Image: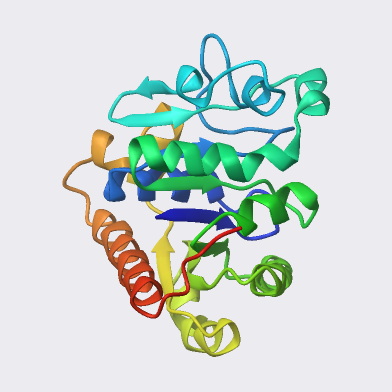
Amino acid sequence: MIVAISGGKGGVGKSTVAMNLARELEAIVVDADLTAPDLPRGRAVDLHDVLAGRADPMDAVVHHGSLCILPCGRTLAGARASDLAEMGRTVRRVERDYGDVVVDCPAGLARDVGTALHCADVAVLVTTPNRPALLDAVRTRRLALDLETPIAAVVLNRSRNGRGAQIDGRVEATFEAPATVVPERAAIADATRAGKPVRDVRPTDRVLEVFERIARQLERCHRRRADDGSLSRS
């Protein structure tokens, strides 16, 4: 299963959600943000090198605590040398060798986002419970559906004072997908600062139930697509 984590707007916590879902799914996470990656970096070759044809994907994978990560480089030259046409083949190769893959997509609606969404079996849209972020997520949904990638879940991240719970029903109706509220909690902030999933930093925190619930929803969506024969990818 290949899961794309997207949403349109930057700063809504896509990378945090990607890391935590990868942990719950026991998946490898690919940092597909070619110009502003957020996941921990590697020490040698990275996704830039892979997409430029200079390295094998398996040589770029690093172990970061409990996670396996295919990190992205941080240079403009590396981003320019990357061939986006290789993204799908790279992610599918990683899936063959590692199993489930979580792709941390860049912000925006440019070609790099579409490329990552196109190679995914399902997508998760991450947003915050405010109008600008929700509008960007709506635009990302349209792009995903144009690419025939179904939305398996919507994450209302960084919810304060019950705001997410007040609108989750409307969000589900708009996106035609289950919405899950992730509250703003110290455990998530602590784990993010440490560059690790919550389970590795605060293994008894209740917020883990939220990430577990999203992970199970992704698995159910993937099984339904497998059962109805709609998983073929170009």
Give x and y (percent) for residue 53: 68, 22
Q: Quadrant of the N terminus?
A: bottom left
Give x and y (percent) for residue 5: 54, 54
Does residue 95 appear left or right of residue 143 in this picture?
A: left
Q: Who's the residue at 37% across and 45% down the image?
A: 22
Q: Quadrant of the C terminus?
A: bottom right
Q: Is residue 12 above or below residue 15?
A: below
- Front residue (pair 214, 51): 51
Q: Who's the residue at 63% across and 50% down the image?
A: 116
Does residue 74 appear left or right of residue 20 in this picture?
A: right
Q: Is residue 93 above or below residue 171?
A: above
Q: Who's the residue at 45% across and 36% down the image?
A: 94
Does residue 119 appear left or right of residue 153 in this picture?
A: right
- The residue at the far top in this view is 44
Q: Is residue 68 above or below residue 132?
A: above
**Colour mapping used in the image:** rainbow
Q: For residue 144, what is the image quadrant?
A: bottom right
Q: Who's the residue at 58% across and 33% down the image?
A: 38
Give x and y (percent) for residue 161: 45, 70
- Front residue (pair 191, 234): 234
**Picture mark count:** 0
Give x and y (percent) for residue 8: 70, 59
